[in-house]
Image (tube, helix red, strand yellow):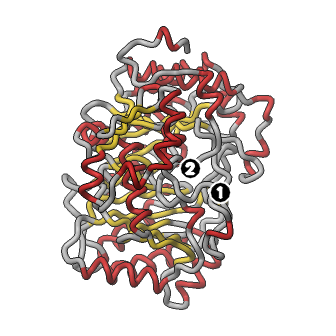
Amino acid sequence: MNTSATPASFPVQFDACTIERLSTSGPRYTSYPTADRFTAGFRYGDFLEALANVKMRGPRGPLSLYVHIPFCDTVCYYCGCNKIVTRDRTKAAVYLSYLKQEIEMQGKLFAGMHQVDQLHFGGGTPTYLSDRQMDDLMAHLRRHFAFAPDHAGEYSIEIDPRTVSPERVQALRRQGFNRISLGVQDFDPDVQQAVNRIQPEEETLAVMQAARNAGFRSISIDLIYGLPKQTLETMKQTIAKVVAASPDRISLYNYAHMPHLFKPQRRISEDDLPSPQVKLDMLAMCIGLLTQAGYVYIGMDHFAKPDDDLAVAQRQGRLHRNFQGYSTHADADLVALGVSAISLVGNTYSQNEKTLDAYYEQLELGRLPVARGIRLNTDDLLRRHVIQQLMCNFELAVASLEQAYPIRFDQYFAKELAQLKALEADGLVSYDGAWLSVTKKGRLLIRNICMVFDRYLGMPREAQAQDAVQPLRFSRTI
């Protein structure tokens, strides 16, 4: 996109030269510190200590639950999620027996403390579970946690439209879900063939209509740009079909091709991938088409209708970012259930065991399956606040930060402000002593800007905990 031709109303400004020069590997900041900084020294006892500290502080806000269902019927070649591809349904039955044990243990620990007003089922494919299994699981959750009423709570589930019928959608609504997220990725048949995800457009639209008929409050669609066989024209056609379908939220993810980390991606021919320049043109085109259709660019890869809760929360300065992306629940402790799931309780992060065998073993011993985690110190909390504000609102009020923490911003972040000078010279940020603001040109490179405040990036290994997880090989920032 020619930046000189970018209309003033456009939410971002594209500068291909700057993007090409600055694009690097970096975190998505769904947490800070990032998950690669969790250590194996943080275990079950540390989680209990964190929970005890939460109880000591008295009444708390609402609770958020995340439930991880790792199973899928088939493998999508682009996928980098923690999943188990199997058609052996007995594995899900075994998993559910252990998951219900973890739910019961966590329910006892949090009894009388919180009311759940947010629930999210992710995976894998949560609808891998049968209707009967989901009925049983939801009933079990409600036995052990107190849920806000339907009109007040946000209860969402990710679905693969290929795995549900209109009748199953009705059942999901009856089971208590009121928000639904559909994995679509691309409507083009050639692209679907290239990533092993054949999903007819009519099937997806039928599921969306069924969700509306069932009374779901919100429908979201996930798309990916940069997939094999994608072109500007095919992407334009997919966006047109999505706009016509009128979901409430749209996520537009950048495909990160890392076959060295994710084996299914080795089945994708690199010759079929669009070039970096075409990918950037795709992103520019998609943002333009979606904003012209009335969607608000929330940030990173999220769009929402102006009256959607995300857009409202951003306008009111209440937007938050967690492991599920952007959220409206900034004040909630997050209890994550299932293999590999990550909790946020008090000032700690904790991650469950990543393999089924290790997850089952801990539960058989009567322990929560916490494998690693981290306790945030004051510096972590301060930097997390800065990164959250920039990621969610594209600006930071210095006076507000100094009221919340006993620091002088210019002194505490003198090194970081010096590093920001280069980004300021590139027109990505501005700083006047009172506000640190991200420009339209800087919004696409928000991860680069936040990386300036990440104390752990570039830290010598000997300065880190000996049991820290090896650093992740992050995706490109754009």
Q: Quadrant of the N terminus?
A: top right
Q: What's the residue type where badge 1 is placed?
A: Leu
Check residue 472 in the rendering and tell me which mark sits there, or answer none. 1
Residue occupying the point 26% across, 60% down: 117
Question: Could you tell me the amino acid type at mark 2?
Answer: Pro
Instruction: Give the image location of residue 235, x and y in percent.
Output: 57, 22
Residue depicted at 39% across the width and 43% down the height: 390
What residue lies at 53% left-to-right and 47% top-to-bottom? 451
In this picture, residue 183 sits left or right of residue 65: right
The image's mark for residue 27 is 2
- Residue extending farthest to the bottom is 365
Q: Is residue 49 visible?
A: yes
Please tell me how crowded label 1 is: few (under 14), some (14-19), or many (20+) other residues with Cα within 10 Å: some
In contact (CB < 8 Å): disc 2 and disc 1: yes
**Residue 387 x, y percent position in the rendering:** 42, 49
Measure the alpha-carbon separation of dots 2 and 1. Answer: 9 Å
Tell me the SS state at disc 2. Answer: loop
Q: Residues within 10 Å of mark 2 (few under 14, many from 20)?
A: many
State the residue at coordinates (30%, 55%). 330
Mark 1 residue element: loop
- Asked if 296 appears above or below 133 in the picture, the reply is above
Q: Quadrant of residue 243?
A: top left
Residue 325 x %, y %: 44, 48
Above or below residue 411? Residue 427 is: above
Q: Is residue 2 above or below residue 307?
A: above
